[in-house]
Amino acid sequence: MAAPLRLRATLALVTGGGSGIGRAICTRLAEEGALVAVADQNEAGAAETVRGLPRGESGQEHEAFGVDVSSAQSVGELMARIQARFSTPPRVCVSCAGITMDEFLLKQTEAAFDKVLQVNLKGTFLITQAVARGLVESGAPGGSIINMGSIVGKVGNLGQVSYAASKAGVEGLTKTAAKELARWGWVLQMAGGQPGVGTAGQQGGRLKGGGRGRL
């Protein structure tokens, strides 16, 4: 007898779901019966992910959405579109959207540093806040938010000053949000303590020279 699907008919949102680790997460959620909202700045990549997701259950539907997680307006529009499509806010959220713009401290530009924090840290904040607000306002009995972390945020790494700062911030954000949202039955946690380097389009393209060997 097959094991019961743990996420049957549960709506899950995955940001950064258009490639790499995010795509793999979408696949696993769908295998557990979830309806998956795949969000990515590259909407074509998100659509490609959706085409490959299993639909093992009657009524198990998935949808691709474009989003810029660093923009509050874009995140707000994403949540409205998800609500219109599925008639419910997501009960599970995985914030996997992220970039690297690797450079040593003495060469890192302000613009590059700001961009990494806007996507990785601010983006995680905006998604976490929006999903939590949606469920609290709907009266749903809790949910789960998983924010993608990195060992680099704990111990640092040569040439990754902006990425390390962003992931350290995500850890603090997640721990604080977990304390604040526990009263509503929410579970927040970090994932991917040592995710390494995936094949996501943005991330892979940012590594320079011997960067892969340094990670």
Image (cartoon, helix red, strand yellow):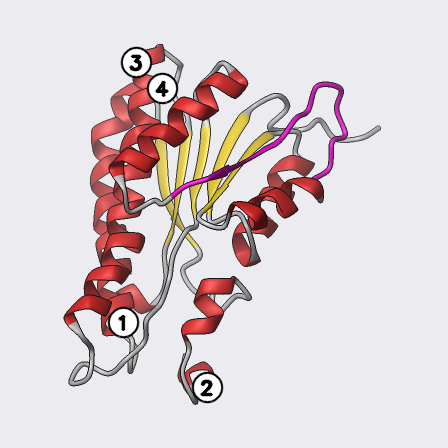
The count of marks equals 4
Q: Which residue is mark 3?
A: 137
Q: In the picture shown, does residue 198 fall above or below 66?
A: below
Judging from the image, what secondary structure is the residue with disc 2 in?
helix
For label 3, count other residues whose C-alpha is less than 10 Å away and answer few (under 14), some (14-19) or many (20+). few
Identify the residue position indicated by label 1 in the image: 155
- Label 1 sits on a secondary structure element that is helix
Task: Evaluate if marks 4 and 2 touch, with contact meaning CB atoms under 8 Å apart.
Answer: no
Image: 155 above or below 96 = below
Q: Secondary structure at mark 4?
A: helix
Picture disc at residue 135: 4
Mark 2 vs 1, N-terminal side: 1
Q: Earlier in the sequence, mark 1 or mark 4?
A: 4
Q: Which residues are magenta?
A: 53-67
Residue positioned 26% across, 27% down in the render: 181
* Mark toward the start of the polypeptide (2 vs 3): 3
In the rendered structure, find residue 126 and report the number of the disc placed on it: none
Q: Where is residue 10, by image quadrant?
A: top right
Q: Amino acid at mark 3?
A: Glu
Using the rendered view, name the quadrant where residue 159 is placed: bottom left
- Distance, label 1 to label 3, CA atoms, is 38 Å
> Contact, CB < 8 Å: mark 2 with mark 1?
no
Q: Are marks 1 and 3 in contact (CB under 8 Å)?
A: no
User: Mark 2 or mark 4, which is nearer the start of the sequence?
Assistant: 4
58 magenta-colored: yes
| Residue at image point 20% right, 30% down | 180
Q: In the rendered structure, which amino acid carries the disc numbered 2? A: Gly
Q: Residues within 10 Å of mark 2 (few under 14, many from 20)?
A: few
